[in-house]
Image (cartoon, rainbow, N blue to C red):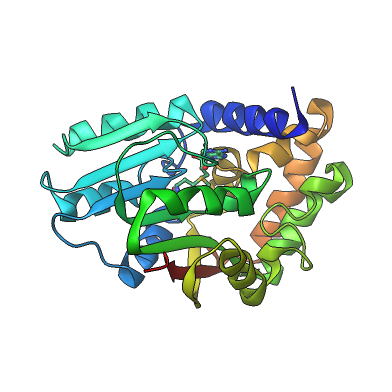
Amino acid sequence: MTDAQDQTARIAGLFDALSTSYDAVGVDFFQPIADGLLAQMPPRAGERWLDVGCGRGAVLLRAAEVVGAEGRAVGVDISAGMVEQTRALAAERGLDHVEAVVGDATAPSVSGEFDAVASSLVLFFLPDPAAALRSWLPLMAPGARLGVVTFGPIDPRWQQVDSVFEPYLPPAMRDARTSGAAGPFGSDAGMERLVTDAGYADVRTVTTELPVRFADPERWHAFTWSVGQRQMWLSVPEEERPAVRAEALHRVASYADPDGSVTFTQGVRYTLATSPA
Ligand SMILES: C[S@@+](CC[C@H](N)C(=O)[O-])C[C@H]1O[C@@H](n2cnc3c(N)ncnc32)[C@H](O)[C@@H]1O
């Protein structure tokens, strides 16, 4: 197995393990971020949409509602567990035209041509994000829209909480949200360069700040296990986790509002482009 295949298999296993709790622990995070993307590239009835790394369908299911059965709404994800969750949610909402398939974001094996390709909070998990971006172009109609979401700056208080993991993290995971200030995920310009160099046109950025409310510190803890950050917990030796957990909860509680809840802000970066006409 190559390093890239190894990374992809590890990430698939991670998301399989958390697929039933993902976006289901009472913290509004992925849906508002997805809704922000949809506001930047509003779906239209009859359009064909591809959501790469669709997770539980935060972008896909909303787009499917608008494009309708006359259009297409295809989601691809490397995690079979996430795909299963998306299919179940689509069925629950009567969105029978949703197609959710297991596949790799780099060269997704889907047929047809798309009017829009979306990928929310996925690129930084990929061994070669530029190759993934390039591989979507042949699937796009001329002038089709692209929208990818990555993270902007994180609340320094939230970062202070997350720093409990630092002693345990392998170098590649030290700044998992952005892969470091020097990489493409560290700035608007870095992301714009990545997308431009992959062959897209009209590349631009919109940033927002999302307030993320945890009803209490325990909710923060549940959230961390239900998202990609779970891999940070898994880096901590099991016998040390109770102490790390206690220290983290202590730090979260120190930022609590009078009602016991804690609200941190998360910068969200939308990088928007079109395929060449
Ligand atoms: C943070 S989640 C985001 C999911 C969804 N887009 C959302 O906004 O809720 C990242 C998703 O990317 C998927 N993913 C990671 N690596 C992938 C790859 N190589 N190919 C396809 N999907 C991948 C994961 O399985 C996971 O569902």
Q: In this view, does 127 lie to the left or right of 168?
A: left
Q: In this view, does 91 lie to the left or right of 202?
A: left
Residue 113 point in image, percent of width and height: 30, 48
In percent of the image, x 47 and y 72: which residue is there?
201
Q: How many labels does the image show?
A: 0
Instruction: State which quadrant residue 235 falls in.
Output: top right
Q: Which residue lies furthest to the top in this view?
A: 1
In percent of the image, x 83 and y 43: which residue is there?
169
Q: Is residue 82 left or right of residue 98?
A: right
Whether residue 122 is visible: no
Dividing the image into 4 quarters, which one contains the N terminus? top right
Residue 193 point in image, percent of width and height: 63, 71
Instruction: State which quadrant residue 168 falls in.
Output: top right
Dividing the image into 4 quarters, which one contains the C terminus? bottom left
Pick the front one: 92 or 53: 53
Q: Is residue 65 above or below residue 142?
A: above
Pick the front one: 16 or 254: 16
Residue 158 point in image, percent of width and height: 67, 63
In percent of the image, x 29 and y 30: which residue is there?
87
Pick the front one: 234 or 13: 13
Residue 131 point in image, percent of width and height: 61, 49
